[in-house]
Amino acid sequence: MTEIRSLIIADPNTIMLQALSDLFERDKRFSLVATSKTAEGFLESCLRVPVDIGIVDWAIPQLGAERLLGILRDRPSAPRIIVYASGGDPDVPRRALAAGAAAFCTRDAPEQQLLDVALSVATGRMVFPYMDVRSLKRDPRETLTERERTMLAALAKGRTNTELAAELGISINTVKFHLRNLYEKLDLRNRSQAIAFYYANET
């Protein structure tokens, strides 16, 4: 007897979401548990009902697929994620793989291809277009925005959040927002690690 794979789909576009739902509901090898138009809704559904597979649009609001993958990466019961996007940006599959996705599929791929990818992912395989995996080893500092680079250097000088806010002309909450993004991009947990990272990588 064929094992039925459970899945959740997330796409901000109502028409696309319906089309994907219909595709998987017609296939008896899958059980569609939930759909969502946001990353937060997808995450909520995953926490409520563990599933095998997640299919997520790369541009899903409001977190985006990249941050969503980062949140799910360390959860033992997280679904294996298939990211899909338009084929215009060759960097998206690499970023999806680096963030922890199990597969990448273009939006314009034939329906059968997406079904095949989902089955492959359900059996533990990873499915990506050809890419130079050496690019995954790039310097993580390259992912930082100019503002985040400035904040990292200021942290290394011992600046507090209040001082950062005053120097940059932004609010404390905005400082915290940028720091949170900085920590996530560099895979750091706190200010001390950020300072250590800065001096270890300063050239």
Image: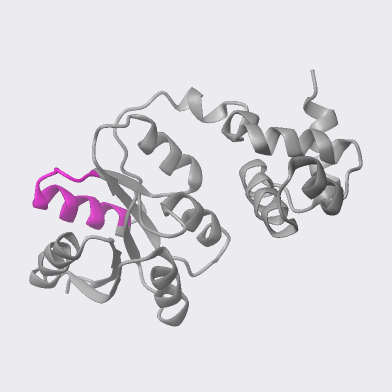
> Residue 54's x, y, as percent?
34, 62
* Quadrant in which residue 87 is drawn: top left
- Give the answer, above or below, for where 147 lies relative to 33: above
Q: Nearer the viewer, residue 4 or 23?
A: 23
Above or below 180: residue 131? above
Q: Extreme top residue here? A: 203
Q: The N terminus appears in which quarter of the rendering?
A: bottom left
Q: Could you say which is closer to the camera, residue 72 or residue 198?
A: 198
Q: Quadrant of the C terminus?
A: top right
User: Which residue is rendered at x = 88% and y = 44% of the image?
Assistant: 159
Q: Is residue 117 magenta?
A: yes
Residue extending furthest bottom?
Answer: 48
Q: How many numbered discs, if any?
A: 0
User: How far across and down, in percent of the image, does residue 19 sit?
Assistant: 12, 63
Q: Judge left or right: residue 28 versus residue 202.
A: left
* Residue numbers of the magenta segment: 106-121
What residue appears at the point 16 percent right and 62 percent down from the top-left corner? 20
Res. 96 image quadrant: top left
Query: From the viewer's perspective, is 114 left or right of 187?
Result: left
Magenta stretch containing residue 79, yes or no?
no
| Residue nearest the viewer, comparing 179 with 141 | 179
Q: Position of residue 30 (x, y in %)?
A: 20, 70
Decide: is 202 above or below 97.
above
State the residue lying farthest toward the right. 158
- The type of colouring in the image is one colour
In the rendered structure, the answer to whether residue 160 lies left or right of residue 75 reads right
User: In the image shown, does 133 or 193 lie closer to the viewer?
Assistant: 193
**Secondary structure character of the magenta stretch overall:** helix
Q: Give x and y (percent) for residue 149.
A: 70, 33
